[in-house]
Amino acid sequence: MSETVVAQGRAEVDEANRRFMEAFERGDAASGAALYAEDAVVLPPDGPMISGRGEIEELWRGLMAAGARSVNLVTLRLAGSADVLHEVGRATITIQPEGGEVNTQTVKYVVVWERTGRSPGARR
């Protein structure tokens, strides 16, 4: 993959991740889920596979209701081609249930970004 493709892909992934983190901080599960492809799959730790944008929205809505307040996404590795990128990263989720103490959980993630039109669409 050329340096130009990597730089452009990195900028697109960083922008999508920024939008996801902002939606999460607003408690906006719908906007966060809208960044996923309609047939995306999420593999939550210690839980069943979640398929489809609607179910993914419910996953995020449930986590937010349980006290998840923010998420910080860090891309550790990005590789692929102009049409498909593979992102490996680390997510730190800040959780504070009502009346409870602040806790953080760090998880790893992999995203396959497929280009749809002018920008990649996420399949997580």
Image: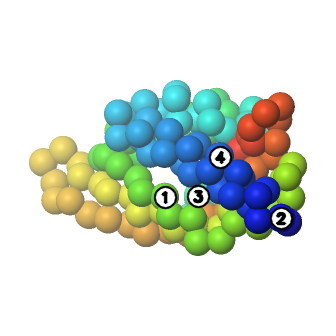
Q: Of the residues shown, which amino acid type is indicated by label 1? A: Leu
Q: Residue at x 79, y 56 (%)?
A: 5
Q: Amino acid at mark 3?
A: Pro
Q: In percent of the image, x 69 and y 58: which residue is there?
A: 7
Mark 2 and mark 3: span between their CA atoms?
A: 33 Å
- Tell me, yes or no, whether the two marked residues, 4 and 2, touch with CB atoms within 8 Å: no
Question: Circle 3 — which element?
Answer: loop
> Can you say whether 72 is above or below 21 in the image?
below
Left/right of residue 115 with respect to residue 8 in the rendered view: right
| Residue 110 seen anywhere in this rendered image of the structure | yes
Residue with the mark numbered 3: 44
| In the image, residue 84 above or below residue 34 | below
Q: Which residue is mark 4?
A: 12
Secondary element type, mark 4? helix
Q: Looking at the image, tell me whether mark 4 or mark 3 is earlier in sequence order.
A: 4
Label 2: few (<14), some or many (≥20) within 10 Å? few
- Mark found first going from the N terminus, 2 or 1: 2
Q: Which residue is mark 2?
A: 2
Name which residue lies at 76% across and 65% down: 3
Question: What amino acid is at disc 2?
Answer: Ser
**106 or 85, which lies in front?**
85
Which numbered marker is on residue 41? none
Q: Which residue is mark 1?
A: 73
